[in-house]
Amino acid sequence: MNAEKVPQVSIVRCDCPSPEVHRGDILPVTIGLKNSTQETQSFLLWFDVTSFDRKALTDFPFFKPVELSLEAGQTVEHEAHVLVPYSSGLSDYLLCLALGPTEVDRWDDHYFEISVVPQRELKSNRCNLCGAEMGEESIIRRDPSIRLAKCPVCGLVFDFDMEDTISLLYQLGQACDGGLTFQKNAPSIIQDYDRKNEIVLGAEINRIGKQMGAPGKRLMDFGCGTGGLLIEAKKIGFDVFGVETSEAAVVYGRSAKALPLYLSIEDLRNAEGEEPFDVIVVRHTLEHVSNPKQTLQGFRELIRPGGLLVIIVPHFSFFVRRILPNSMPRFSYGLVHKGHQYYFTKDTLSAYLEQAGFPEIEYHYSILGGFLSRWTKGAEDPTKQRMVAGASEAFSRLLHVTGVSPVLTAYAR
């Protein structure tokens, strides 16, 4: 703790369930925090990891700082989840919990010991697509925080330790739309995110509308974030509904955009009725779910005969996974990370859709205008919007024709 700084918020409790952890474990830490002042305090909470000589280990990515606030005199408990990287050595470490207005000025800190120890037994897993059983010999990639396995039978690639990932995402309330964690106190971030993606979402919805017709048709966006795609769908006449696991995103979408957003399909149907949907959009969400087979079979029951299922997922092609992440990280969208459970190719995505009862599958060029709108100042200007949209379409078509698009867009019936 910085002795020159008077603590505005202090750590009154820090409990770790076990000092021994394995590589790949997610370590829950219960933290008690107290605001001793008479004013609301906003601050950062973060972890550092050091060796026993207190030398910082920068290659040990534990926990990103989170923003918190406490009312005057308030005491709360906060649960943090610390990921132990697979690249960590079998050794003892000092884990430092710290808080303060910035990462430089600390109000308080707390050190405790952990030991990274060998796994007691080898894990096994079963392929979600074909059911083949496999062990750790199927692991094809070991990154600092993730191990990817490839099924030797059907070729499906997935996170070998996905059970932990699911728990982590739900505990943190991470939204699926763009990997952005929505916070109630960050509306400006959300508005900027929506604006930058307006061109992409509008173009996708217009293409769907041309295929299905829009007025009076029911459209559900599964993993809708705060509802940016639904806003565009309303403009051309769709009756729209959204499902999103992030409560903060649902609250924001309902209050700021007046959209019918729900935390689950069950909640949606209880509130809106069980009439089937004409269109279901699953945009950058299927790669996050724990059971794609069950999820897609559920969509089969929700969609009316002749209805359209739109699946948009990252493309785990040779080009994308071998070249883009290394040479052009801005284009690779962080393809491999702990939030992604599954990594689809055209073959494995098609197999999933056919098994779920969607035999008619068309692959369209993916609309990749997000990075263009991010680089273009004043994208709200109509003339500049048309320029960005035109450049985006030309670039996206080129990648689709050459087979190196970083995104798969499937229209299935």
Image: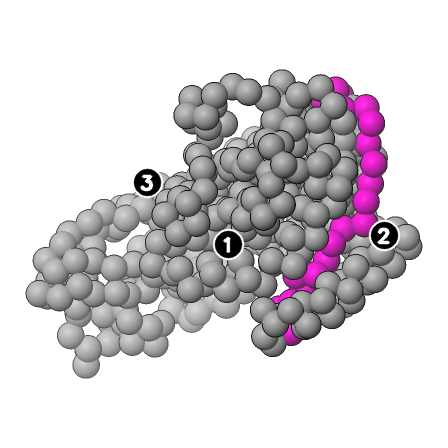
Q: Position of residue 263 (x, y in %)?
A: 43, 34
Q: Which mark is residue 17?
A: 3
> What secondary structure is marked by label 3?
loop
Q: Residues within 10 Å of mark 1 (few under 14, many from 20)?
A: some
Which mark sits nearer the N-terminus, 2 or 1?
Answer: 1
**Which amino acid, mark 3?**
Pro
Distance (Cα) linking label 3 and label 2? 49 Å
The residues tagged by marks 1 and 3 sit, at their Cα atoms, a distance apart of 29 Å
**Where does the N terminus fall, quadrant-wise?**
bottom left
Q: Nearer the viewer, mark 1 or mark 3?
A: 1
In this orientation, which residue lies closer to the viewer: 73 or 33? Answer: 73
User: Circle 2 is placed at which residue position?
Assistant: 400
Q: Residue at x 43, y 53 (%)?
A: 182
Corner quadrant of residue 109? bottom left
Does the segment drawn in magenta span residue 375? yes
Identity, as a three-letter code, of the amino acid under mark 1: Leu
Q: Could you say which disc has been placed on residue 180 in the image?
A: 1
204 displayed left or right of 265: right
**Residue situated in front as seen by the camera: 54 or 255:** 255
| Residue 49 or residue 79, whichever sits in front | 79
Q: Tell me which label, 3 or 2, sits earlier in the chain.
A: 3
Region in magenta: 355-376
Nearer to us of marks 2 and 1 is 2
Q: Residue at x 41, y 45 (%)?
A: 258
The secondary structure type at the circle numbered 2 is helix
Task: Give the quarter of the image for residue 70.
Answer: bottom left
The amino acid at mark 2 is His
Alpha carbon separation for disc pair 2 and 1: 26 Å
